[in-house]
Image (spheres, grey):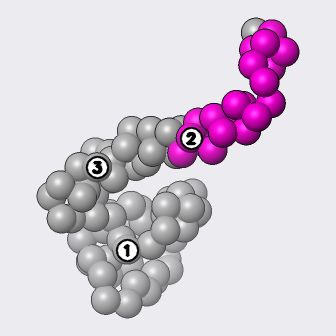
Amino acid sequence: MKQIIKKLIPKSLLDKYYPYKWQYLNIKTLIKEYNQLQSMKEWKSIDKNNNPIAWYTYPTLEYLNALDLREKLVLEWGGVARLYTGVQGQKK
């Protein structure tokens, strides 16, 4: 299907379309996967389950959530880390 579309639509039009396509996909991911729209509405850093999240980038949160940090301390300077439960079993 993509090959047919590429053959039918001139390259100059496709070149204008693709940046908007990627922007749309990015916004869709931020809204659905990261709950960013709700987070902005409530003026809180929350995940898709409405739990508080630390003020890290999303890739950093995903990385930390994948680690076993039960015996470790994770420092977050100036945010809501004490409310963040994503780091499972973190020492207090």
Q: Is residue 83 left or right of residue 3?
A: left
Residue on which disc 2 sits: 20
Residue at mark 1:
55
Q: Which residues are magenta?
A: 4-23
- Where's residue 37, x and y in %? 28, 49
Q: Which mark is residue 74?
A: none
Q: Residues within 10 Å of mark 3 (few under 14, many from 20)?
A: some
Front residue of 25/43: it is: 25
Q: Which amino acid type corresponds to the residue marked 1 in the rendered image?
A: Trp
Query: What's the amino acid at mark 2?
Result: Tyr
Q: Mark 1 or mark 3, which is nearer the start of the sequence? A: 3
Q: Distance from label 3 to label 2 (Cα)?
A: 19 Å
Rendering coords of residue 83 (x, y %): 24, 71
- Residue 35 or 9: which is nearer the viewer? 9
Q: Please determine whether, in this image, residue 83 is positioned above or below residue 52.
A: below
CB atoms of marks 1 and 2 within 8 Å: no
Residue that extends furthest to the left in the rendered view of this protein: 42
